[in-house]
Every structure is written in structure tokens, then in C-alpha cells.
Amino acid sequence: MNDNHVPVDTDIPVGNHVPVDNHVSVDTHVPEDNHILVQVEDLKKHFPITRGIIVQRQIGAVKAVDGVTFDIYQGETLGLVGESGCGKTTTGRTIIQLYRPTSGRVVFDGVDLTTLAGEGLRHMRRRMQMIFQDPFASLNPRMTINRIISEPLRAHKLASPQEQIERVQELLHLVQLNPRFVNRYPHEFSGGQRQRIGIARALASNPQLVICDEPIAALDVSIQAQVVNLLDELQDRLGLTYLFIAHDLSMVRHLCDRVAVMYLGKIVELAHKDELYDHPAHPYTQALLSAVPVPDPTVERRRRRIILEGDVPSPVNPPAGCRFRTRCPIGASCPDKDPHWRDLGGGHWVICHQA
Amino acid sequence: MIPLLQVQDLTVRFDVLDGLVHAVNGISYTLNEGETLGIVGESGCGKSVSVLSMMRLIPQPPGKIVAGQVFYRGRDLLDLDDAEMQHVRGKEIAMVFQDPMTCLNPVLTIGRQISEAIVVHTGATWEQGRRQTVRLLEMVGIPQAADRLGDYPHQFSGGMRQRAMIAMALACSPSIFIADEPTTALDVTIQAQVIELVKSLRDRLGMAVIWITHDLGVIAGLAEKVIVMYAGFIVERGSVDDIYGDPRHPYTLALLKSLPRVDRSSHEPLATIGGMPPDLLGLPAGCPFAVRCDYRVEQCLQENPRLRPILASHEIACWVDVAGRHGPVTGRAI
């Protein structure tokens, strides 16, 4: 799956993107005939901070996602990486409309999801599903596996009771679990098996887009590889499109086609994975990659780490201008205004004054 | 030379409702002055319990140290009474845990908590303790340390809390610093800060370090000796170059092969280890890894191999030595 995207130099905006002030459409690494499944345009999600018990006043906002723009192509895996609190999970949840955005658009296959509500949104939701991080919290402990996996079928009225039974069997086969397990409860399964159940549930309604929110973070090393291989295989068989949200940069390089790096509510760099990992342009990406340990002592002895000072600033009150300014090793002289997207060629986009 | 720490045949069980959990099954190792030992393994392999029981920090009951000795500078820690042990803990051997939020007392200030360790162990006055605390916090890189003594743990970020924990562990200049997954809850950039900090403090203060982790990457850049644990047993032990460059136990090999690398492009499916770790309530008669092992022979299912040397400083607990047999481990699914 990793090889079917031929990098083509495009700076022609693909699709009907209207660049929103300093945001250009960020189309990277895409054959001209490739179909855009999701367009995310200047998406913002601010969570209000209120004070007062009876009369609540808003006294500020957590700017969790603060203007992100990217496309997801049909059949690709787009990785979304960044440290905790950078807004990657919120981005995923806002795309699928679990959170309604503060502003911006999410266009799924030509339909703007942000304008939909009620039945219209339910109808679209069938086509996009989510796999959650915690395989213990995301399965209802009082439901049997059968009920968990068939719930999307019932919710969207996709199958008769008889068809549901068949579909659940088929899905269990697909995620390589023993179909005899249907009447068991989640506590009878290990973390890796539960994650497979979560995957089966996500696939029940035949979605096109699956948002994987840290699906392997809670699993042991030897089990992670099993789940990642399964996701890879399912993509090949079912033609799925993934948005893979993770902080494990090694796994993201293995699984994804393109990777977007987020910092404090903004995307700072977006490129094809090998381009991003071999030639990171943004100082944050460089620091992030240099911090990932490599399981090889000879390499580790040679490696130079870029150690960032301090912590990520609060998204309530982010720094003016470039968000990374306060920790950037080369940003001391940067101007006090927002940097713009720049194309470094080959679909490698970066948002930095210096790079 | 007498090693600083010598663990011999340590065996720990937990008596729970369902039966006896065989958490640690007769492990032995030594640690010399100034040396860094990495203990790696997956959850439930006994890596944390082995050091917690050595520090006598497991709840007894249900836990029980069934057998073994832990010699620290010639004294068996398992024979000490509680008061003597209290003196060793924190002063001679200090420990940092995974989750700094649950290890710090939320209703005491950071300054008070670190000073307390100094006052209790060295008999210093509170004023001396306070001054020493400022020095320690500065050493671990907390900005404006003197102003932050009055802060409570919730006012610190995750990385700063872990630094405060490290400062507390260093308060009495211990000779052994034990870190139990101290960076697992942290982001990679903060993890890098903490690792660099421990490395530089180790080199400056000459402490020995035991670093427990499930992340083979972290150990590669930090340790000199590595122990790989599985189901409460040590399955492989050697220098860091031996373990990563020439793994001889099938489990170590499989673990290394299942890891994607950030510095390499990969297109092949990841090698996987089929199945799951065994239930520690009832260990199989043979090698605990046998059922998941690609190199299994008949003997593996019948008899559990003991650690045996294959090179001067490299040992494996395996009937089969995978040296020179590194065919690609086939990606099996369960």
C-alpha cells in the first residue's frame, strides 16, 4: 500500500479549494487523478472556559485546534503526529463531527459536514468511523461482542437480525478473531483482542474513512505489530482511507503515506513520510524526530539530539506569531506575525519563517 | 571486586484469589559501581516487581519473597528490619516511578516534599534542607527554583514533576538510582530531556542506574548492560551491543524485529510475535516462550532452560541459540 502514490509535483490547487487568507490548499504528493475524500479547511475548535455557577460567563477559550487545513486522499493513510495537547485528537473528533467546529469546513466527498445535523449527519457518519485509543474504556462492559459489533448495523438500520448475525461472523473473521467468541464479554479479552473488536465495530457499517486515534498506544510492543499489520491488511482488502493519529513516530513512518505534524493547534509541516523523516524542514519536526530513540546502540551513540527547552505553552494563551517561537532553537529573530505555508516542492509543505 | 548490588535467585509470588501468581522466578544479576543496567520486557514480565521487592516495597501479603538474597554492599536487604531498610531506601538506593502525579503528595508543596527527604535521612535542619532543595531543583533544570518551592505538584507540568521526582531521588546522593519507566507517561521531547538529564547526572555523580522500560529504544542509548525479561524469567543478558547487535534468544530477536525504526523507511509488514504472554498463575512446564517461538524444538515444551553463557558476558535461557539463524521471522497472525 505504501507504494501506490507516485509523487507528482503539483502546486495547482486540487479540487475546489478557496484559499482562506494565508492558508493555501495543501495538496501534497498526489497523482492528478487521485480523489480527495476529505477536505479540511481552516478548521478551528475552541473550548470555552467559563466562570460562575448560575450565570456563566466565558472568560477565555482553549484553542485546541486553531486553523488547520489539509486534504485526505481516497485510499491513503495520513498520519497526524504531535505531542499531547497539540490538538491531534480534537482534530480527528472535529472531522467526524463528534465535536462541532468553532469555524471552518470539513468537506467529506463533496458534502460539507459542518452544515449538516440530525438525520443528514447520521447518514454521512455511516461512512466514517473511529477506532479509539483505550480498548478498555471504549467497549461497553455489559454488552456481548455480538451486540458491540452489530451496534452500528442497528443504529444505521443496515441489516435484518439474521443478516446482523452473518455480518458479525464475517467481521470477526476479518479481524482474525475466533467467531465463536460472539457471546463473550469484553473483560474476557486481552488488550490486543479488544482493539480488534473495536476495529470490527468500526468496519461494520462499511465506512470509507476510519479515524484511528492512537489505536496501539495502550498495547504491548509484540501486540502493536499485530494490530498495525491488521490495519494495513484491511486497508488493502477494503480500500479504506485512514487518518492515523499517533505519537509513536516510528510506527507512523511504517504505516502512513503522508504525515502532518501538529504543534499547539496548528499543522507546522506536511509531507510524504520519507521526505518528512529524511528531510524535516521545520525546527519542531527536527527536534521531535531527533528525540525518538532508535533501538540500535551504535546509531544512538552517533546521534545528536536537539533538546527543546521548557514545555509546550498553554493553548489558552498561545504565543503571538509562530506558535513554536518560545521553544524554537532558531526562532529568536522571527517576526511577530503568523508564518505562511510554503511549498518546498514535491508536496512538502512547511509553515515557518526560517525553513 | 565485590559488586555494588548482587541479586541472587530472587523469587516473588503473589497469593491471590485465583491462586499463586509467579511474578518473578529466580532471577540473578549484579550491578557494579557507576554502571547502567537496563531491564526490558513487556507488561507483566516481572521487571517492576523484581525491583520493588528488592526495595521491599511490595505489599506483603499478598506478595511474598519466596526465595533469594539481595546483597547491597555485602548486606542482605531482605534480612534488614524495617528501620534499617528505611535508612537504605532513599539514602542509598533511590527510586523514581512512572507516574509522577501519583507519587507526589498533592497537598504538600514540592519544596516541603524534597526537603523532607533530606531532613529525614541526613538530620539536617529544615532551613538547610530548603537550601539543598533549591540546589537540587536547579540541578535538574527547574527555572527559578527558589520561587517554585512553594508550588504544589499540580502547578508543575508532567516533565517538571518528573524532574522534581528525580531531584527528590538525588536528595541524599544515592549510590543506586532506580528508574521504573520514568518517561513512559511523557512526550518524546520531554522524554529526551529527562534521559539527557539522568545521563549527565549519572556521569557527574557516579551513581549506578537501573532503568526499567518496555522501550528498547530508550535502553539502546543509555545502558551498558541489558536484561531481557519474559514471564518472570531473565531470558537474555548481555552488553548493550550484544543484545542489539547479536540477539541470541528468539524472544529478543522477535522483539527487535517487530519494532519499526524512525530512521529507516520500511515497506514490509512488521514481524509479529503470535499469541500472548503466558498466564503467570500457571506457568507451562517447558520454556515460557515456547508456544510463541518460531525456533521451538521438542525439548522446549518439556524442560525450562536455565541461563547459560554463550560468550563471556552474554547469556541466554534457551535450548536453541538463534545465532546465524536469522531468517526473517515470518509474520504470523494469531
Image (spheres, coloured by chain):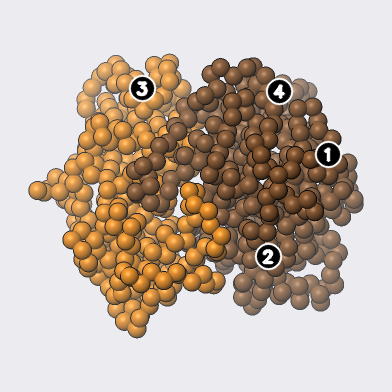
Residue occupied by mark 4: A60
Residue B273 seen in the current view: yes
Residue occupied by mark 3: B138
Let me know if marks 2 and 1 both belong to one chain.
Answer: yes
Separation of residues labelled 3 and 1 (CA atoms): 51 Å
Residue furthest out toward the right: A119
Q: What amino acid type is highlighted by mark number 4?
A: Gly
**Is B275 positioned to the left or the right of A66 in the image?**
left
Callout 2 touching callout 3 (CB < 8 Å):
no
User: Residue A228 at x, y = what percent?
Assistant: 58, 60
Residues packed near mark 1 inside 10 Å, few (<14), some (14 to 19) or many (20 plus): few
Q: Which chain is brown?
A: A
Earlier in the chain: of badge 2 and badge 1, it is: 1
Residue occupied by mark 1: A17
Residue furthest out toward the bottom: B298
Residue in view at x 36 percent, y 22 percent: B138
Q: Secondary structure at mark 2?
A: helix
Separation of residues labelled 2 and 1 (CA atoms): 29 Å
Residue occupied by mark 2: A236
Host chain of mark 2: A
**Is A252 positioned to the left or the right of B277 in the image?**
right
Separation of residues labelled 2 and 4 (CA atoms): 45 Å
Q: Secondary structure at mark 3?
A: helix
Q: What amino acid type is highlighted by mark number 2?
A: Asp
Host chain of mark 3: B
Q: Nearer the viewer, mark 4 or mark 1?
A: 1
Q: What amino acid type is highlighted by mark number 3?
A: Glu
Q: What amino acid type is highlighted by mark number 1?
A: His
User: Residue A112 at x, y = what percent?
Assistant: 86, 44
Separation of residues labelled 4 and 1 (CA atoms): 31 Å
Callout 2 touching callout 4 (CB < 8 Å):
no
Q: Which chain is orange?
A: B
